[in-house]
């Protein structure tokens, strides 16, 4: 089975960085290309119930901060692939479910392998991403390489 197009979800964590490095090494050895994916937290969803307590400018600032963070995370991961001479593209999305964004990207982009970390950032986000990895493993239409 040839793996021509790898999808690599990244959240900027150390574990995610290891997955990026492994994916780049694999892609280089196979002559594959990589698409890096960062799924931003849905800021609007996290503010549900806050109502009038949150100023519109605060929401705009939070959205911009999330976009800036995503840009930085993808640029850092992209640099690893470019330094190795691996063809790379990036995708950023904002969604309620990380796993659903990953699965949608696999289908839309025609990826034939997902390379992802076993867990992401620590704390509550880390717990969610750990469960997101499990969901991807169960539902993915292609093989999944989980990096520890």
Image: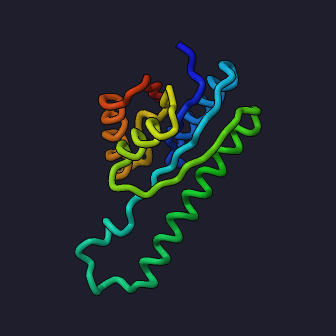
Observer-nearest of 60 and 3: 3
**Horizontal placement of 113 versus 136: left or right?**
right
Q: Residue at x 52, y 44 (%)?
A: 10
Using the image as rendered, state which of residue 71 and residue 22 is in the foreground. Answer: 71
User: What residue is shown at x 53% (from left), y 71% (from top)?
Assistant: 64
Residue 62 in the image, given as x and y percentages of width and height:
46, 72
**Colour pattern:** rainbow
Image quarter of residue 131: top left
Q: Position of residue 65 (x, y in %)?
A: 52, 69
For residue 3, which quarter of the picture?
Answer: top right
| Outermost top residue | 1
Q: Indicate whether 64 appears above or below 51.
A: above
Q: How many marks?
A: 0
Q: Is residue 6 above or below residue 124?
A: above
Residue sticking out furthest to the left: 49
* Closer to us: 88 or 146: 88
The residue depicted at 44 percent of the width and 36 percent of the height is 107
Q: Quadrant of residue 19?
A: top right
Q: Where is residue 85 drawn, in percent x and y?
A: 76, 33
Residue at position x 34%, y 50% from top? Answer: 97
The relative height of residue 13 versus residue 25 in the rendered view (above or below) is: below
């Amino acid at each position: 089975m040839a793996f021509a197009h790898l999808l690599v979800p990244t959240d900027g964590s150390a574990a995610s960085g290891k997955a990026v490095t492994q994916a780049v090494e694999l892609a280089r050895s196979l002559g594959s290309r990589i698409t890096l994916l960062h799924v931003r937290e849905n800021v609007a969803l996290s503010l549900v119930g806050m109502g009038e307590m949150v100023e519109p400018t605060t929401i705009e600032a939070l959205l911009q901060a999330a976009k800036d963070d995503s840009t930085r995370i993808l640029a850092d991961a992209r640099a690893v692939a470019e330094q190795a001479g691996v063809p790379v593209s990036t995708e950023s999305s904002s969604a309620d479910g990380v796993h659903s964004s990953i699965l949608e990207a696999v289908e839309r982009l025609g990826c034939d392998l997902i390379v992802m970390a076993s867990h992401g950032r620590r704390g509550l986000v880390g717990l969610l991403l750990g469960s997101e990895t499990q969901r991807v493993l169960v539902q993915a239409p292609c093989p999944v390489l989980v990096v520890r």
